[in-house]
Image (cartoon, helix red, strand yellow):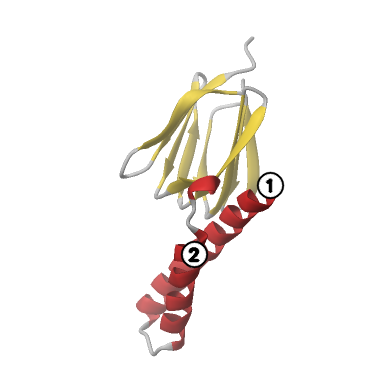
Amino acid sequence: MSNLFKLEILTPKKEFFNSEVEALTFTSTDGERTILAGHAPMISTLGIGELRIKKDGEWETAFQSEGFVEVRPDEVLVFSQLCEWDKEIDLVHVQKVKAALEEEARSEQSISEQRHTAISLARTITRLKVGSNSKTRL
């Protein structure tokens, strides 16, 4: 049995990743999960967090947004609202977005607007964390 499996990561805008890999670790809404070759079929939610892919013995890291993961006998499919490689995150831009969202959160908003701002802020803070971790690993 091979220790590799096909991983495909899709976002609404593009195919983010498509290759054979050794492992996938992602943030679900109830904790971190790791998938290896031969994993039992399952479906899991995808939360805002860090996604790591092990290919050719090396780990690659990306930011992930909400979505879901489907583990099939022959492949793993990830559907995420947004994926971005840690090295490609523009920390200066994301800091500006964070400041704007924090200002927005202090303004008077409806309950719906408050929820939207809170989710956007959570995404932004996580992008900063994932991108900053990349810069410290260099």
On the image, the x and y values in percent for residue 82 come to 41, 49
At which x and y percent is residue 61? 58, 42
Position of 3 compared to 74: left or right? right
Residue 129, horizontal then vertical, whole percent: 60, 59
Rate crowding at label 1 as few (under 14), some (14 to 19) or many (20 or more) other CA atoms within 10 Å. Answer: few
Q: Residue flagged by tag 1: what amino acid is it?
A: Arg
Which residue sits at x=47%, y=52%? 65
> Which quadrant of the figure contains the C terminus?
top right
CA distance for labels 1 and 2? 18 Å
Label 1 vs 2, first from the N-terminus: 2
Task: From the viewer's side, name the closer residue of 58 and 80.
Answer: 58
Q: Which residue is labeled 1 in the image?
A: 137
Q: Residue 101 at what x, y percent from top left?
A: 44, 75
Question: Label 2 belongs to which residue?
Answer: 92
Q: Secondary structure at mark 1?
A: helix
Residue in the foreground of this view, choosing between 138 and 16: 138
Q: Secondary structure at mark 2?
A: helix
Up the image or down, 32 lies above or below 123; here it is above
Q: Residues within 10 Å of mark 2 (few under 14, many from 20)?
A: few
Query: Residue at (50%, 18%) from the top-left corner?
Result: 74
On screen, 77 above or below 96?
A: above
At label 2, the amino acid type is: Val
